[in-house]
């Protein structure tokens, strides 16, 4: 597995600064992506972990079959997948300083999975790094038909577009210009990068193809240093409280 620092050109840096995202084409080779898809297949056999009360798992309704609770994501994932851990490399050139892994998840997005409404990844928790960015590594081809991520350019300059109250907020589509949306159409081996203040969304997967993508999030070393363990402790505590509001109790992490 090739895990060196991703090459970032001056033009990609300019796009990152101006638009809040950039794409590196062909970062990984065919062998890398073949191994990644095999690993995703293996992880789908971990039914021992797929429990609606397991804080590691995410679930989505299926817009085709009507299933209300379909498994969709492992968050975190690198502790159960050495291959995903090996992909968690540092993008030093984008930050122009060393980076620290903050969060990692593998979203499987099977056919019919609903997708995600417009939001920003940055959340107003005390100490949440404002340098937060996400590296998106597609294991399958991603396009409009299978619910690729759509980013809205330039809005990262405005910071948080929702109350900084420590909660997660979906954004009204009235806050963005539809013409500034860019669907991240990616081939396996490509890498997309977008900042934590970039509004983004994804449509349902209405194809017959999976859209498996690894999401690796980082912060600048100067913006809190290593804090992945702290983040997941806070995130799980937040999830426990949120789930309890909807009657889901006796949750656990496995």
Image (cartoon, grey):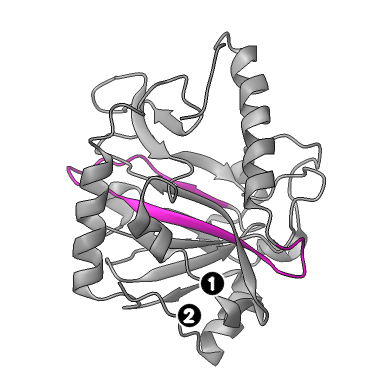
Residue occupying image coordinates x 57% and y 8% = 247
From the viewer's side, name the closer residue of 170 and 28.
28
From the viewer's side, name the closer residue of 135 and 208.
135
Task: Give the percent coordinates (x, y) of residue 98.
Answer: 65, 76
Q: Are marks 1 and 2 in contact (CB under 8 Å)?
A: yes
Rendered position, 220 above or below 93 = above
The label shown at residue 20 is none
Queried whether the magenta region covers residue 205, the answer comes back as: yes
Locate residue 117 relative to residue 80 in the image: left or right: right
**Measured Cα–Cα span from mark 1 to mark 2:** 6 Å
The stretch in magenta equals 200-225
Q: Quadrant of residue 29?
A: bottom left
Rendered position, 209 above or below 153 = above
Task: Give the percent coordinates (x, y) of residue 226.
Answer: 68, 60
Q: How crowded is mark 1: few (under 14 residues within 10 Å), some or many (20 or more)?
A: many
From the viewer's side, name the closer residue of 148 and 4.
4
Rendered position, 236 above or below 231 = above
Rendered position, 243 above or below 79 = above
| Residue at image mark 1 | 90
Residue 134 seen in render: yes
Q: Quadrant of residue 21?
A: bottom right
Element carrying mark 2? loop
Task: Give the percent coordinates (x, y) of residue 123.
Answer: 71, 45
| Residue at image mark 2 | 5
Task: Give the percent coordinates (x, y) of residue 84.
Answer: 38, 57
Residue occupying image coordinates x 34% and y 71% = 190
Residue occupying image coordinates x 43% and y 51% = 78
Rendered-image quadrant of the N terminus: bottom left
Of callouts 1 and 2, which one flags the residue occurring earlier in the amino acid sequence? 2
Q: In which quarter of the image is residue 4?
A: bottom left
């Amino acid at each position: 597995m090739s895990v060196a620092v991703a090459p970032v050109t001056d033009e990609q840096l300019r796009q990152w600064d101006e638009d809040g995202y950039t794409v590196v084409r062909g970062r990984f080779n065919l062998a890398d992506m073949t191994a990644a898809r095999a690993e995703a297949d293996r992880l789908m056999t971990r039914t021992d972990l797929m429990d609606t009360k397991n804080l590691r798992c995410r679930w989505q309704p299926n817009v085709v079959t009507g299933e209300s609770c379909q498994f969709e994501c492992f968050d975190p994932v690198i502790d159960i997948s050495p291959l995903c851990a090996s992909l968690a490399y540092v993008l030093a050139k984008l930050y122009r300083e060393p980076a620290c892994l903050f969060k990692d998840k593998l979203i499987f997005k099977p056919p019919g999975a609903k997708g995600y409404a417009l939001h920003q990844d940055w959340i107003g928790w005390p100490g949440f790094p404002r340098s937060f960015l996400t590296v998106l590594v597609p294991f399958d081809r991603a396009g409009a038909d299978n619910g690729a991520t759509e980013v809205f350019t330039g809005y990262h300059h405005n910071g948080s577009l929702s109350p900084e109250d420590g909660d997660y907020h979906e954004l009204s589509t009235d806050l963005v210009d539809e013409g500034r949306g860019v669907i991240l159409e990616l081939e396996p081996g490509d890498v997309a990068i977008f900042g934590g203040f970039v509004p983004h969304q994804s449509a349902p997967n209405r194809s017959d193809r999976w859209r498996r993508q690894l999401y690796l999030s980082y912060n600048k070393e100067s913006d809190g240093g290593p804090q992945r363990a702290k983040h997941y402790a806070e995130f799980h505590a937040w999830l426990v409280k949120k789930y309890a509001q909807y009657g889901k109790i006796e949750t656990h992490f496995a």
